[in-house]
Image: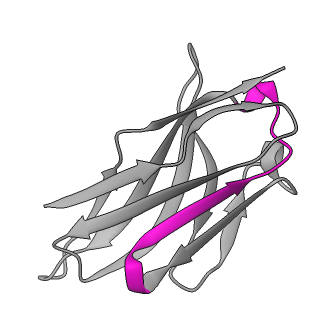
Amino acid sequence: QVQLVESGGGLVQAGGSLRLSCAASGSISSINVMGWYRQAPGNQRKLVAAITSGDSTNYADSVKGRFTISRDNAKNTVYLQMNSLKPEDTAVYYCNANVIGPFGWSMDYWGEGTLVTVSS
């Protein structure tokens, strides 16, 4: 079993910053891609940013230049630094990890989500 625990969400004014963290624990040999997704009310869950084990990154166009994803492989932790936040960034943010288990299997895991609310 693998658990992903997110932290760092909250309420912030437009133009402000937040930093999300997601720590993975359990039966982990290594982690391939780690990412952040978000889901606003009435909308589908969408990719915000992703990072490979080699630190290659990918961002949604809407957050490029404002958000930065990073990871600490030794801690199995991924971060999302969010700057210049806008009301349209309001959503539940979910952590995702593609985990390689001790016997070589690969499986995707999700965190429970953390709410980010940006007030105008």
On-image quarter of the C terminus = top right
Q: Residue 14 in the image: state x and y as whole percent.
A: 84, 31
Q: Residue 93 in the image: state x and y as whole percent.
A: 53, 39
Name the side, left or right, on which 86 lies relative to 99: right
**Depth check: 2 or 46 in front?**
2
**Depth check: 12 or 41 in front?**
12
Q: Residue 15 in the image: state x and y as whole percent.
A: 88, 38
Q: Residue at x 42, y 50 (%)?
A: 6
Q: Which residues are magenta?
A: 74-89
Would you identify the image quadrant in which residue 96 lies?
Answer: bottom left
Q: How many marks?
A: 0
Tell whether position 77 is magenta: yes
On-image quarter of the N terminus = bottom left
Would you identify the image quadrant in which residue 74 lies?
Answer: bottom left
Q: Residue at x 35, y 48 (%)?
A: 110
**Depth check: 8 or 22 in front?**
8
Q: Residue at x 51, y 58 (%)?
A: 21
Vertical side of 47 occupied by 43: above or below: above
Q: How is the image coloured?
A: one colour
Name the side, left or right, on which 28 lies relative to 53: left
